[in-house]
Image (cartoon, rainbow, N blue to C red):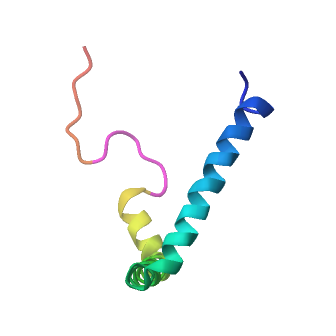
């Protein structure tokens, strides 16, 4: 069976829709769980936004620490091994 096979996708799609329907029914019946989910989702979005802003600000500095610019004749800072 290939990934695009309709015989494989039909049961998979049905399972996904069933899980979504169960999640929707559970969401409507449990306000505390919905509130916690919204709080954690907001925290995740806030964290990802903060990471993006920090990387935009400090990313070039961090890259400069790990990637050397220009020509490197050998291993920087390592002792040169004698030729055999």
Question: Taking 64 as reference, is 30 above or below it?
Answer: below
Residue positioned most to the top? 84
Magenta residues, start to end: 69-76
Q: Is residue 42 visible?
A: yes
Camera-side residue of 73 and 56? 56
Residue 70, image x, y percentages: 49, 54
Residue 40, image x, y percentages: 40, 79
Camera-side residue of 68 and 37? 37
Q: Residue at x 61, y 47 (%)?
A: 15
Q: Is residue 56 visible?
A: no
- Please tell me whether residue 62 belongs to the stretch shown in magenta: no
Question: Taking 2 as reference, is 79 above or below it?
Answer: below
Question: As drawn, is 80 to the left or to the right of 25?
Answer: left
Q: Residue at x 57, y 70 (%)?
A: 24
Quadrant of image for the N terminus:
top right
Camera-side residue of 66 and 73? 66
Camera-side residue of 46 and 53? 46
Task: Tell me which secondary structure the magenta stretch mostly adopts.
Answer: loop
Q: Residue at x 49, y 71 (%)?
A: 26
């Amino acid at each position: 069976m290939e990934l695009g096979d309709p015989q494989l996708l039909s049961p998979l799609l049905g399972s996904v829709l069933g899980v979504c329907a169960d999640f929707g029914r559970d969401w409507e019946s449990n306000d505390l769980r919905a509130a916690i989910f919204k709080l954690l989702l907001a925290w995740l979005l806030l964290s990802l936004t903060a990471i993006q802003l920090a990387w935009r600000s400090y990313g070039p500095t961090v890259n400069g620490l790990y990637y050397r610019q220009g020509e490197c004749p050998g291993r920087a800072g390592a002792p040169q091994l004698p030729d055999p």
